[in-house]
Image (spheres, rainbow, N blue to C red):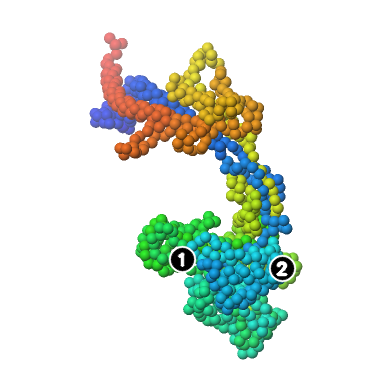
Amino acid sequence: MATATISGYASDKGGYIRQTDIANASSLSGSISFSGLGSGTDMNSVVDKLVQIEAIQKTRLENWKSSWQAKIDNMTGLSQRLLAIQQGANDLRSETNFMVRQGASSNSGVASVQGVNGDAVMGAYNVTVGGGDANPIKHIMRSVGFSDSNSVISGSGGTLTLSINNKDYNITVGANATLNDLMNAINSDPSVLADGALSARIENDGTGSRAYHLVLTSGTGGSAGKIEVKQNPTWMSFDSSNMILSGNNMGGGAVEVSLSGVFTGDKANGAFAVYTATADTTSDVSFGGIIGTDPFNLDVTVQWYNQDGSPSGSSFNFIVPVPGNYVPGQSIDLGAEGISIQLGPGTLADGESVSVTAFANNIDEAEEGTNWSGPGIHTSGNYLGSVNKTYEFTVQDSGDIGGGALKISWRDNAGKSGVLVVGAANTAVEVEKGVMLSFEPGDLKRGDRFSVDVFALDQQQAQDKGLAQAAKVVHDGFSDYDVTPVTSASGSVFSYTYGGTKVDVDVFPGYTLSQLVQAINEDADNPGVQATMVNDGLGLPNSWKLVLSGKNSGAEYQITNISHNFKDSNGVSTFSNGGEVGGGFSVSQLATNSMIKVDGYPSGDNFMQRPYNQMADAITGVNLNLTGIGSSTITISVDSQGIYDKIEAFINAVNMCQTYINDATKFESSENSDDGVMSAGILIGNYSYYMIKGDISKVLTARAIGPVAGQDPYLVLADIGIESDPETGAWNIDSGKLKQAISSNAEAVAKLFIQTPPDETDASKITNYGVGKDAYDLIGRLTAAPSTTKDPVTGKDVTSPGGPLNVLISNYNDIIAKIDDRISYEERRISLYETRMRQRFARLETRLSELNGQSERLSAAIDQLPSNSKK
């Protein structure tokens, strides 16, 4: 018995199938299947074959589409190869690119050449790295600025004591002395003249605010020539800490007093301040050897002054308690503005005092730009950096101050930049390193500019060698690293300043030395300081040393102003807090700049300074690595092999492109093929390919515009050994001939390739067109992308279709789009055809099943008739 399965429903009752199921077949043709039991034929296979025959046109369209896509892919590949030619041409089209330079050093122990680019000018340069007796680096100090050279710099006068190489020079400063007076007093001092100890001059920096500075230059080079100021009766700073010991009668002057820290007082209070600390004790206090005996107080009064020496009106006083267990040499903080004094052994009497003059006049007032239209600007704070700087500011947001957060970007002359946000009028905002700005009420206008100059004392540090290095400071030492706590007190803080940025590190009770190291290194605000421990191996109670090292080289990145408030369980500090930079630390290595001269520049005692030893701007186009003191001749010459390599790379790119075009357009008959089968390239007969190949050949065979026959030795590429093979079309290089041409006259070879002057838009000014320039421009035209520009006259959009390759690719994509439309039509038609065929064969199968059923019933009925054998 036959069975037809329609939409998953089967009937085997005498071959009967419901008519409703047949009716549903029109919407379910994809799910109709035939068992073939009714007819003995596999109707599914029949329909599949019919549909396959009907899809021949679709297959043809798909194959046609693939052929067009293959052409597009080939053109994309050609475009990539053309761009490789353009890159090679770019390396040859200007003298800067073409003339490959190389550098050599006569003394790599002083400086080596790490790289040379096309901007380098060929020749010999004498590079001197400062240091030693031959090229001493002299200490140069530069004071803060004054309005003119006749500005008064001292009130009652006194003695300015300068110390150089352990010798003191006492300069008499008269009452109401001017900047000129002080310069003359130094230069005419008999002891200074006899020893050639130092010289003084006045420098005008050309700025609009406080342009006149006193500059002191040591007569001795290296660290021995460092100028130190022991006594200063003037109103200007002569110390990088911004403070000076201005008076001492502690113990009748017998108790030695030293300073540590860096003054951070705000210039908003005045130009300088005098701190006077007076001993307050009921009886004489003695301390010496190890520990003092009685506690005492220091009554501190602070008076601020203006730049002209008049009181500013800002003054205050406070009490500093000194414990009875004070250890001579430990730091005593005089308030919260960075001043610490250290008392030596001796006896103090009630009323004895020490005075410190601290300066906050190292930030100039703002200089407004030519078109400044905003409100008044005020500077405040105290610059904590160690190099002179100019900050340039540009307003980014227009608006009323106080009406929202307004951004102002800044950049210094060392390349560092940032953004400050102004939210309210007359509210100071920090730029960096203690420099503060505030604005009066008013409107800021986007694009307005202003600048601020800040000053550091050392214009040129006293260095033994002119190499850049990072700062390193070492603590006096501790007993162990993992057992004894450095502090047992709550609220302990370890503070330091790095590169002008102050950092506070929380230190918890019970922290050991190793945990302190970890806290410093893992501090989120760490600006670039690495803490380590080292054991000096002497087996002493203080053999474990805490070392702080800067991660940045350059004089700007000193480690200063170290302090802590560590106490043991008895309230005694067992972690030294004296030292040269405070906190028990002394300088092991100063952060220094590299210092060089190139061909004697800069003249005199000055050196070019950089915060690193890898210098890319001392000689244009040359990267130097400084390695030691002394002199070296840096020679910049033509790199003949480098030029050859560029030309070879260009020719190789041309040949790769030509070969690619040949493969795409070739025809090979069956007689000429290896396998006896005719073959053709995918773009045979394509005019654009032949045109591109021809245009490239024309560029390479053309005579350069510029070289003159009889005057220039080379007029075409063939003259330097570059010719095309007449049989294959490939370009060949006679390497011997080309290398000889480059080594003998590289400039003449360059004329065959470069454009002069480079990148000139006015063709009338161009004196030389070469292969590099022409090839670069040609490829630009061939591969140009579609673009839209405004007609300058009508203002209408003008669309350019781009280069020929992009035009072809666009056209071919249009063809593919149309083929896709036809394929979609064919898919719909075939689907309908398949539906009709499956419906028809479903009905046929059903009918055959019915007929088979009738046949079976007839056969059964006949079998019931009497047998013929009974007749």
Image depth: mark 1 or mark 2 in front: 2
Against 133, residue 632 (above or below) is above
**Residue shown at 64% from the left, 42% from the top:** 123
**Residue shown at 59% from the left, 83% from the top:** 278
- In the rendered image, the quadrant that contains the N terminus is top left
Q: Secondary structure at mark 1?
A: strand
The residue lying toward the viewer, choosing from 268 and 836, is 268
The part of the image, by quadrant, that contains residue 457 is: bottom right
Please, what is the three-letter code of the amino acid marked with disc 1?
Leu
**Residue shown at 69% from the left, 68% from the top:** 193
Query: Can I make out residue 347 in this image?
Result: yes
Against 497, residue 35 (above or below) is above
Residue 227 location, x and y as percent?
66, 67
The residue lying toward the viewer, choosing from 207 and 797, is 207
Q: Secondary structure at mark 2?
A: helix
Q: Which residue is mark 2?
A: 194
Q: Which residue is mark 1?
A: 437
Residue 826 location, x and y as percent?
33, 26
The part of the image, by quadrant, that contains residue 48 is: top left
Please, what is the three-letter code of the amino acid marked with disc 2?
Ala
